[in-house]
Image: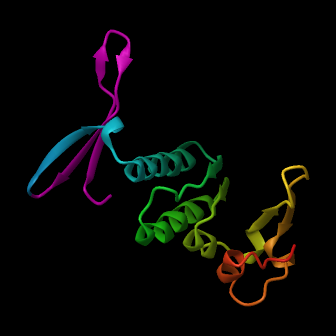
């Protein structure tokens, strides 16, 4: 979010606060309650907080279930790359995703494939580099041709 200027947590009642996000450009500025942000904007804010916390207090373990799920396709790659890069110097970032663009941002060595034949069987986990894939991984996933 290139126009993000500030995040505040002002007192709104005796023992209550409410996050407020301020955006600014050359034309002016506006403050928006965190609750009024879109789901994608909230994901960016959470990402920024995770990156800051890992830098300031790290190393952290961040497990995020589908961090890409409210983002525009054009933003997914940048988003995942920023998280991966931030955690290379310490900590651990674990994500789940069904998004082809997010999956492409990870190498075969650090990508796990989880699968099960039915809800009555346990989930099996294999490293992607141990799974048989013919051709493009994303195409194979779409066709359900990934052979565990």
Span highlighted in magenta in the image: 1-26
Q: Position of residue 90 (x, y in %)?
A: 66, 56
Instruction: Indicate whether 111 appears above or below 38.
Output: below
Instruction: Indicate whether 110 appears above or below 2.
Output: below
Of 133 and 10, which appears nearest the observer?
133
Magenta span main SS: strand
Q: What residue lies at 87% left-to-right and 61% top-to-bottom?
A: 117
Q: Position of residue 34 (x, y in %)?
A: 34, 37
Q: What residue lies at 89% left-to-right and 49% top-to-bottom?
A: 120
Instruction: Indicate whether 123 appears above or below 134.
Output: above
Q: Position of residue 112 (x, y in %)?
A: 77, 65
| Residue 106, magenta (yes or no) | no
In this rendering, position of residue 6 left or right of residue 102: left
In the image as oriented, which residue stretches furthest toward the bottom? 135
In the image as oriented, which residue stretches furthest toward the left? 27
Of 121 and 114, which appears nearest the observer?
121
Q: Position of residue 6 (x, y in %)?
A: 28, 43
Q: What residue lies at 65% left-to-right and 72% top-to-bottom?
A: 106
What is the quadrant of the N terminus in the image?
Answer: bottom left
In the image as oriented, which residue stretches furthest toward the top? 14
Count of numbered tags = 0
């Amino acid at each position: 979010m290139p126009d993000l200027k500030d995040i505040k947590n002002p007192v709104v009642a005796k023992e209550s606060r409410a996050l407020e996000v301020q955006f600014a450009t050359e034309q002016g500025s506006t403050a928006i309650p965190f609750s009024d942000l879109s789901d994608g904007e909230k994901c960016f804010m959470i990402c920024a907080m995770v990156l800051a916390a890992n830098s300031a207090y790290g190393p952290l373990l961040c497990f995020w279930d589908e961090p890409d799920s409210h983002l525009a396709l054009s933003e997914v790659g940048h988003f995942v790359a920023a998280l991966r890069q931030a955690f290379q110097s310490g900590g651990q970032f674990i994500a789940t995703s069904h998004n082809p663009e997010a999956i492409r941002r990870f190498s075969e060595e650090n990508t796990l494939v989880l699968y099960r034949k039915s809800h009555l069987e346990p989930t099996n986990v294999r490293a992607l580099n141990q799974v048989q894939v013919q051709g493009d991984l994303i195409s194979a996933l779409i066709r359900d041709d990934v052979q565990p």
